[in-house]
Structures are given as C-alpha cells and as structure tokens.
Image (cartoon, rainbow, N blue to C red):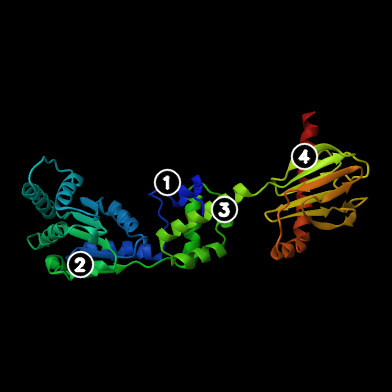
Amino acid sequence: MQETRTPLGTQAFGELADKSLIVAYQSHQDALRFLASALSQGNGVALLHGPAGSGKSTVIGEQRDWASRDAPVATFDGSHLTPRQLLSGMLSQFKIEFGAEHDEQLLQQLNGFLTSETRSGRPPILMIDNVERATPSALRLLNWLAALDVRGTYALRIVLSGKERLAALLRDESMRSLTRRHPATYSLNPLTVQETVIYLRTRLIAAGGERSEKVFPVQICQKLHELTGGWPGALNKGALEVMERMAELRATRRVPQVTVSRDGKTIAEYKLTEKQYIIGRTELADIVIEDSHVSKIHAMLQIYPNAIVLLDLNSTNGTTVNSRVVQKAILRNDDIISLGRYRVKISNAPAINAEMDRRIRESDTITMQNLVDFRRARARRTVKALKSK
C-alpha cells in the first residue's frame, strides 16, 4: 500500500500524537493501582510484564508523574543502558551536580543522596522500561542498588518493565539482591472490543477529528481488534493504516457532478459535494431550472458515498430519466434527466452495491424529512430577505 500520511491520522495515532493523551482502560487502570500499591510496600519493587506495544511505557510515564509529587523519580529506557548512563542519569534527574568523576565517585554521591532521602521518609524511585535490553554491567549495578538499605528500609524503590524475558532475568544469579526483595508482578492485558471502540474514537476526537463513529464504525473497530489482539501499539498502527487508506480512496474518487444544458448549450455545472440538492424553479433551490414545466420544488438529488439517488417530489409534470418517467431512480454515468427544455447530465456517478440499493429503497421517510427541513430553511431565508428590504 502506498503510504499517505494524513495530518489528522499522525496526530491521533502516529508520530505527532500527543504523548500526554492517555485513554484509560481496565488493564491500564489496574496496572497503575498495582504500581502505587507495590511502591508503598516495604519491599518496594514492581515488575510490569507485557509484549511490545502493550502500553508499558505509557503506564510507567503516568505513574512517574504521580509519584514525583512525593519523592524523587528517575526514569530510563533500558535499551543498551550502561552503568555510566545509569549513574549520571540518576544524578541528573535527582538534580545533583556532578562533574567528570569516575564511576566510583558518582556512586558515592548517589549513595549519599539515597541515604539522606530515605532517612527523610522519601526513598527515591528508579523506573527502567525495557530493562531486559540493558547491558549486563548495568544490570549488575541495578542489583547492587537494590541491596542498599538505611536502618532496615530499602533506599531505592524500583519499577522494571519488560517482556516475558523479565521473569528469566530475575532467575539469574547476578540479580539475587533484587530477587530477595520479592518483587510484585503484574501482566498487562489487551483492550476488549468495547474498549477498542472507545480508545480509537477518543484519540481521533482529541486530535481534532469529527464524526469519529464514521471513521471508526463498530465493524472496523472489531476488525482492528481481531487483527491486533487489542494491544494499544498495534491498534495505533492499524488505525493509522485505516485512515491512510481512506485518504487514498478519497484522493482517487472523482467528485460526482451534473451539467445543465438547454437546447444543447451548457448553462451550468455543479459539483455534488453536499448530501442533497433540491432541483426546482424557485431561486431558493440548489439547482435552478427556469422552465414553466418545472415545479418550484421539483426533485431532489441525494448523494451517498456509493450512489446518487433522484427523487421526484410530487412535481406537476413529473421527472424523466433517459426518456422514462420515474418517481425514484438510482443514477449512473451519462444518465439524462429531462426537465422541460432542460437536460441534466450525470457524471462521475459512483457504483452501488446491494446493501446501498436496499438502504435507498427504505429511504422514503428520510426523504420526506429532508424535504420538510428544506421547506423550513426556505421559509427562514424568505423571512430574512423580507426583513432586509
């Protein structure tokens, strides 16, 4: 598929999406409660499991924002994390000034800070996402930090997230200090179908989209859930692909139009970009036909994504399509509507399917309501015009 990045799509689901936009669902909320509870316990270690795109980073980011109100917090992406990066990063995020000292000196500074904060009842928090990707030496440093305590209280609370390999990591002999703290564990679950509908529509609305139910009807949401398993990351990717595909279809779809002619001479052309058009002799009609054989409100064109429907509105002289009098007709390319001495030719009419044909046959009630709405609008415009004279 040719890639067509849409601004709305990228803002809702792509690289331009607002990172602060969080659509909570059951497992997300349960994970936050789990982290808050685990960090309040004496052992103070929490492990968050989940596959790529399961929302681990989002959960950790939200928990960090909450926890930082009460204690110093340092967060890392564990990918290729080294001891130097871990030490300098913790000092920097804890707002401790340091120079180009050796790792041993940095470790002393960090140990002093952890001890001081723990004695004050605010043991700091270390959060590492994708911890299984860290270098072995960084994991050994993490294990050393996990053993620090001040008068029986651990000097560092720890949150680690990763895939299934996280459990195997704790079975490694080099991580025994962390294992001795008996970490609490939570595995994220995917969204349900109902949560998927809310998730997709909410993100689209937050990005400035309208009619989210049209972009993501229940059937599309169900299909995306089936294809992605309901994991947020995969849903974002799938939703972006759906919107890109829709943009491609809109770009290639030709706009339907009508050409009005009289005695073989073109009088006017109209691109059919609205949902409905009134044809009639009155100046308040959308397509004006100045012919005595045409009623003031003669006919209506209803524009669907995959059909153009012509409806005669009980006109005096009737409506003819291709020399045949009709009350209702589905119009196709090059169809000719005859109205007195005028001809209305249809171009770029979309093809229809059986489902649309059924819907059109059931549309009489909607049509009458549309006509009532038009008459009311015409009355309002007439009153306004009279007042302005």
Q: Is residue 176 above or below residue 246?
A: below
Q: Residue at the spot x=41%, y=51% of the render?
A: 21
- Residue designated by label 2: 169
- The answer to whether residue 75 is seen in the rendering is yes
- Residue 36 at x, y = what percent? 27, 61
Which of the two labelled residues, at mark 3 and mark 2, occupies the earlier sequence position? 2
Q: In which image quadrant can residue 92 be found?
A: top left
Asked whether the residues under the numbered discs 1 and 3 touch, taking CB atoms below 8 Å apart as contact, a structural biologist would say: no
Task: Count residues near mark 3 (Cα–Cα under 10 Å), then give few for <14, some for 14-19, many for 20+.
Answer: some
Instruction: Identify the mark nearer the N-term, 1 or 2.
Output: 1
The crowd level at tag 4 (other Cα within 10 Å; few <14, some 14-19, many 20+) is some
Please, what is the three-letter code of the amino acid marked with disc 1?
A: Leu
Sequence-first tag of 4 and 2: 2
- Amino acid on which disc 2 is placed: Leu
Q: Earlier in the sequence, mark 1 or mark 3?
A: 1
CB contact under 8 Å: marks 3 and 2: no
Q: Quadrant of residue 265?
A: top right
Tag shown at residue 191: none
| Numbered marks: total | 4
**Picture coordinates of residue 93, whole percent (x, y):** 20, 46
The image quadrant of residue 329 is bottom right
Marks 4 and 3: in contact by CB < 8 Å? no
- Which residue is under mark 4? 269
Dot 1: element = loop
Residue under label 3, please give it: 246
- Where is residue 369? Give x, y as percent: 76, 55
Q: Specify the label residue 16 is tagged with.
A: 1
How much space separates mark 1 and mark 2, taking CA atoms? 34 Å
